Amino acid sequence: AQTVTQSQPEMSVQEAETVTLSCTYDTSESNYYLFWYKQPPSRQMILVIRQEAYKQQNATENRFSVNFQKAAKSFSLKISDSQLGDTAMYFCAFMKHNTGANSKLTFGKGITLSVRP
Amino acid sequence: KAGVTQTPRYLIKTRGQQVTLSCSPISGHRSVSWYQQTPGQGLQFLFEYFSETQRNKGNFPGRFSGRQFSNSRSEMNVSTLELGDSALYLCASSLGSAGSREQYFGPGTRLTVT
């Protein structure tokens, strides 16, 4: 079974600064996907970024980038130039890659990020 | 393209009753997954449906069930409600194919059991 751990329950960052959210996971799978989801106070869960485990290159999406360390089973999210709209709960999630193509996500407990004006 | 929709958005039920929640996926998406979100347990996977077949199930009692229709819309049912079933129920849709794993979530249904 897979587990995802987000050890920091809360973080705070000043607007325009950079913040890094940590995530570690445990799996015996060699091929899988990792995701970061954002859940603002309105509750709609939004996909922020995804990483395929077989890819060496770290994924980036505008101000969001990841640091994927497969050997260390670490998957951190860096948010650059933080904005007030980034205030939300952030979830790290794992999905196995399999030919059966089922889509179960295993989530971490989440981290609450507050961006201060 | 319209996003994932869930109805109703809020529900209040009494212990022992049953409830049905509905989810309409993004047009063209064939996979629908359901998750339960609570402050204590976080986000937990309930089940996934693809082309009207359940192809994955989480560790929930048999009181939790679901189905998917030919138009990919999905319903989940909880029978004999317990206080602990109070939660936000999230539905997520995806294409469901091996090459496309992103799941897109609906706004959720907030269920309160009294």
Image (cartoon, coloured by chain):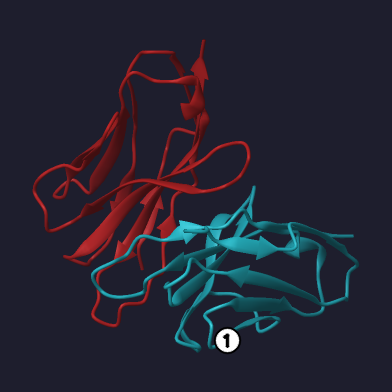
Q: Residue extending furthest front?
A: B1
| Percent of width and height locating residue B64 | 67, 78
- Circle 1 Cα neighbour tier, 10 Å, few/some/many (<14 / 14–19 / ≥20): few
Q: Is residue B95 above or below residue B88?
A: below
Q: Is residue A43 left or right of residue B12?
A: left
**The colour assigned to chain B within the rendered structure:** cyan
Q: Is residue A108 left or right of residue B99?
A: right
Q: Nearer the viewer, residue A72 or A39?
A: A39
From the image, tell me which residue sits under label 1.
B69
Q: Is residue A47 above or below residue A90?
A: below
Q: Residue at x 71, y 81 (%)?
A: B63
Q: Nearer the viewer, residue A56 or B52?
A: B52
Q: Quadrant of the C terminus of chain B?
A: bottom right
Q: Residue at x 78, y 80 (%)?
A: B79
| Percent of width and height locating residue A115 | 49, 19
Q: How many marks?
A: 1
| Percent of width and height locating residue B37 | 61, 55
Q: Is residue A108 above or below residue A77?
A: below
What is the three-letter code of the residue carrying label 1? Phe
Q: Residue at x 61, y 53 (%)?
A: B107
Q: According to the colouring, which chain is red?
A: A
Q: Image quadrant of residue B69?
A: bottom right
Q: Is residue B57 above or below residue A86?
A: below
Q: Chain of mark 1?
A: B
Q: Is residue A66 left or right of residue B14?
A: left
| Percent of width and height locating residue B19 | 79, 74
Q: Nearer the viewer, residue A80 or B63?
A: A80
Q: Residue at x 28, y 66 (%)?
A: B100
* SS under mark 1: loop
Q: Image quadrant of residue B46?
A: bottom right
